[in-house]
Amino acid sequence: MKIKEVCERTGLTERTVRFYRQKGLISPRGEWRNGREYSDFSEADVEMLAAIATLRELSFSIDEILTMQRTPGAIPDIVLARREAARKEHEIAENTFAVLERLDAAGVSDVAALASRARDAAAYRPHPAPPPRPEEVNESGMGERCHSVPLELMGKWNWGAFLFPVIWGLANHVYQALWCFIPVIGFFYAFHLGSHGNEFAWKHRYWESIAHFKRVQRRFAAWSIGITVAAIALNIGAAIASNRAAERAERIYETRLAALDESIKGTPEWQSLAGGRTLWTDALAKEKFDAYPTEQARQEAGILNRDDAFYLEPDAYYRVLHSNYYDFDEGENAAITESGEIVFNDTDKAHAEYSCRILLSNGEVWELAGDADASGTFTGVTATLDAERTARYRAYWASIQRAMEALRDYVARRTAEVISSTLFLETVGTEFEFTEAPSPAYVSYGAVYEGGEVECGGFTAYARAADGTLYYVHVDVNDDPETGALTESPLAIEPVAEEPGV
């Protein structure tokens, strides 16, 4: 039902109903429509509003009503407290009425005179003796028979129950804390214990007083927080130490590997393979590739990318594909100084089992392995040809060469077709020169890297006729929108002012 009908049935104003909803006393179902929320109140909501109105007439506070809703066991204590407050208010009202009844305000001309007569009237009424304080009922330790948990303990977070739930539960006889041993469920149940720990502990263990309860729980909280903080600090310290140790070990490994990489070059086995060859670097790759500045020059040389230039001179270069080593005995306990020098605990026992893989520009892949002592001197070095990898690198280079040959054949064939066509002869003539070498309009090398064939199509070139006119000669390649296949447009020849980029 809508809020207007609720107000008619309960006698409350809309503002009051919204206020009670805002405070959480009722929870009607809400629905968003057109950017606004519309509430749908149930019969239970109407009954609760009527009950709230009755309790508010008896001067129960919003917080007291909320507590009675959420913790029905606290109702007797709250009613007792409200009754005591009402009794005191009643006594104050009776005393006030008695004083005002004896107060004669006739002829009073100012506030000071009125206050003086009020004090005289109050002097005739003796102050009532305060009633005896009701004896507190201690129901702690009675388990589910405990219907009265002190209000000042309700709703307070219990850090001991949250941080060390199992230990706290055993000490306070709250054995449902053992649920925290169950993965995932235990994590969420710890939050439940933190929220309701005071209530559980009061019900399941006997306490001499509220002060005794608070003292013990504070002690639990202090120890729990202290141990947790200490554990976090130890973990952070251990993580930092572990990271530093890992960084130190990495530095030792990289430094020694670099030294072994350099030392292996002095062995006869290395010299017989890589001696006289140059190490292939990125700078060298760029230099060699830049020596072929045009697409035609790279096609003539038979290379697709910078690293392909590595194979053009089979006896000139080498590349280190992989290297590593493994320490034995005291070699694992090496230290490194600030200057980068490696120091061993026992140099007589320190040695490393080293291996590396090198690629020669003729496509051969060799595995070199041997033992090195603390000073990096190698003994027992062996060199083994990796036939499988050699075959793979040579197959790659062979596929590149086949692709380049196929590309050159394609360009030559299409060039011959174009220059002998009627359109070319009538437009450009027989006397001409290509200012930009002919090439395919579309080229894909994707399949070549896997040993496949080059994909190409179309034609493009710039030709200057005998009269000096520059023509753009092209056969374009397009995607068929229906089949997705590549299709070629007819030959087109167009006069242009200059080549693009000139």
Image (tube, rainbow, N blue to C red):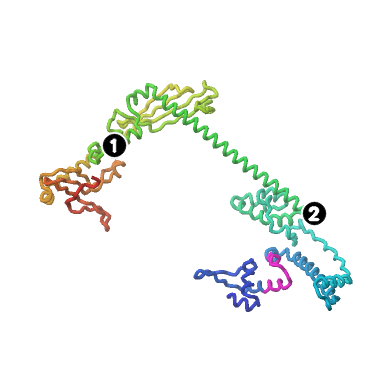
Q: Is residue 310 left or right of residue 354?
A: left
Say which quarter of the image contains residue 397: top left
Say which quarter of the image contains residue 275: top left
User: Element under label 2?
Assistant: loop
Q: Where is residue 28? Give x, y as percent.
A: 60, 70
Near mark 2 (Cα within 10 A), the count class, few <14, some 14-19 or many ≥20, is few
Q: If you read the primary sequence from the N terminus, does the residue marked by circle 2 or circle 1 appear first? A: 2
Q: Main secondary structure of the magenta part?
A: helix
CA distance for labels 2 and 1: 91 Å
Q: Which residue was labeled with disc 1?
A: 290
* 65 magenta-colored: yes
Q: Where is residue 233? Give x, y as percent.
A: 62, 41
Q: Amino acid at mark 2?
A: Glu
User: Element under label 1?
Assistant: helix
Near mark 1 (Cα within 10 A), the count class, few <14, some 14-19 or many ≥20, is few
Q: Where is residue 346? Give x, y as percent.
A: 54, 22
Nearer to me, 472 or 120:
120
Closer to the camera: disc 2 or disc 1? Answer: 1
* 186 magenta-colored: no
Q: Where is residue 41? Give x, y as percent.
A: 59, 73
- Span shown in magenta: 50-66
Q: Quadrant of the C terminus?
A: top left
Q: Which residue was labeled with disc 2?
A: 208
Q: Quadrant of the N terminus?
A: bottom right
Residue at image x 33%, y 33%?
284
